[in-house]
Amino acid sequence: MSQMPQQAAPAKCPSCAEPLESGDLFCGACGYDLSAVPAAPPDHPTLTMGAAGVGPSGVNWPPPEPESSETPAAPHLPTDLPGTDSGGTALPASPPPPHGSPAVPPPHGSPAAPAPQGTPPHGSPVSPASGVRFDRPPEPDEYPLQAPDPRVAASAAETAGAGGSAETTELPKVCVACRAGRVDDDGYCENCGHAQPRERDHMEQEAGPVAAVSDRGLRHHRNEDAFAVGHTTLPDGTPATLAVVCDGVSSATRPDEASMAASRAAVEALLAALEQGTHPQQALHDAIVTASQAVNALAEEPPSAREHTPHQNAPACTIVASIVASGLLVVGWVGDSRVYWVPVDRAAPPARLTEDDSWAAQMVAAGLMSEAEAYADERAHAITGWLGADAYELEPHTASFKPDRSGVVVVCTDGLWNYAETAEEMAEIVPADADARPLHAARVLVGHALDGGGHDNVTVALLPFPEPPQGAGSA
């Protein structure tokens, strides 16, 4: 969830470069439609880096086949992730970009169907038929902060009688603000009246080697992010870890429910598919479709339920996920949440593994604006892809990589990457021991965003990528 910038005409026409005035919808010189957004580049969900197959685990996964006869172009990353091609030849690595330069993916493959006019700002989908955006009133810059996460007092065990039987008594919850008053059933202190923190204000979870942390941040009144992590065993006995992170679309109804429903549905689908031996890339594509269906189901409510909010959009969210299994690193996404690769050996280059579904990314991909110009525009974070009944078209993006060294996979919402946008900046804030202490590292990353201002909900999951068996990652 991000703040919703208002649409504004660019200073110059993207077509003829003639000066424009604020509020122009068409260029007075050439008639260019200033609300038009270039078509999003198509996804190549079978794109792989390194050798096809799955390494030494023995799982008989066939190599993914490209969707078309054309050879898909390699994804644009701040750096190329070292690996090998299907013939075992070492892949060349491009030098990293200058520190601090924003990474935006260029187009690859054939052009996709035109995107609808009226591109929604991040957290604000629009009706594809009318192009009308229904924004909520702008949120205030500051919200009263709630107290820290409470710690429920431990139950007291009292020994009764000579037989030594134990009787457990649950102590009443004590206010986290005044530390004196009792908390009533409505979540308020009976002494000072302070509202107690909600369950989703701060969440942490570990599942085997993967860990995730989510925080409400310092500016928003609720946490509309959600995550789900898990680990399982493949049919051949090798381990697999996975993480799903979702960011609720702020102007939609019940965005917190959308992100929670999507993350839970996706991780359940992934665990079931991997345990049956499904290729991770196919499993992730199918899981995103399942998550989309779960979000769509939230919109299936009686007409009376929307009488008081007839102009609001259906529940919606973005999604990003990653799987580490049998030497493969698989990522999938819809929206602008991201995945970063940070090697344990910091002398090796880090990389961003996803491409945003955003206005800025499409402007750069179409060659209409430079990266600096696009990301300086107030429409930069307007999303062009999301999960929800109001989505223009569901296009899950997936990609598969085969790193030749150990590292950490960072799966996060823009509440974090807004404070560390490039792969190099992200690598600088990831603790050196993140592969051994992922929960601690996730806390550190959330703390970095909060120290930077905490303008958005912050969610991050970390998946350690183990050292590949000798000879499996490089020729």
Image: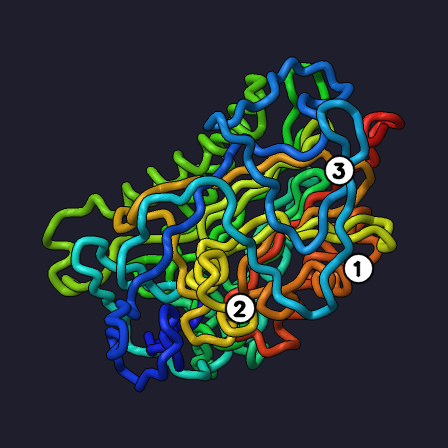
Residue identified by numbered label 3 = 403
Looking at the image, residue 36 sits to the left or right of residue 162; the answer is left
Q: CA separation, marks 3 and 2?
A: 31 Å
Residue identified by numbered label 2 = 370
The correct choice, above or below, for 334 with respect to 443 in the image is: above
Secondary structure state at the residue bearing disc 1: loop
The image's mark for residue 303 is: none
Q: Between label 3 and label 2, give the one nearer the viewer.
A: 2
Residue identified by numbered label 1 = 431
Looking at the image, residue 137 sits to the left or right of residue 369; the answer is left
Q: How is the image coloured?
A: rainbow
Q: Give the image location of residue 168, x and y in percent.
A: 59, 48
Callout 1–callout 3 Cβ contact below 8 Å = no
Residue type marked 3: Pro
Which residue corresponds to the image point at 44% horizontal and 81% vertical from the top-left?
A: 143
Residue type marked 2: Ser
Query: Which quarter of the image is occupied by the C terminus?
Result: top right
Q: Is residue 189 visible?
A: no
Q: Nearer the viewer, residue 108 or 286?
A: 108
Which residue corresponds to the image point at 58% horizontal and 72% vertical from the top-left?
A: 148
Q: Give the image location of residue 191, x and y in percent.
A: 47, 81
Residue type marked 1: Pro
Which residue corresponds to the image point at 31% horizontal and 50% vertical from the top-left?
A: 114
Q: CA separation, marks 1 and 3?
A: 20 Å
Q: Give the image location of residue 150, x and y in percent.
A: 58, 66
User: Which label's residue is closer to the chain start, 3 or 2?
Assistant: 2
Looking at the image, residue 26 sits to the left or right of residue 468; the answer is left
Q: Nearer the viewer, residue 323 or 365?
A: 365
Structural crowding at the residue carrying mark 1, measured as other residues with C-alpha within 10 Å and reported as few (<14), some (14–19) or many (≥20): some
Secondary structure state at the residue bearing disc 2: loop
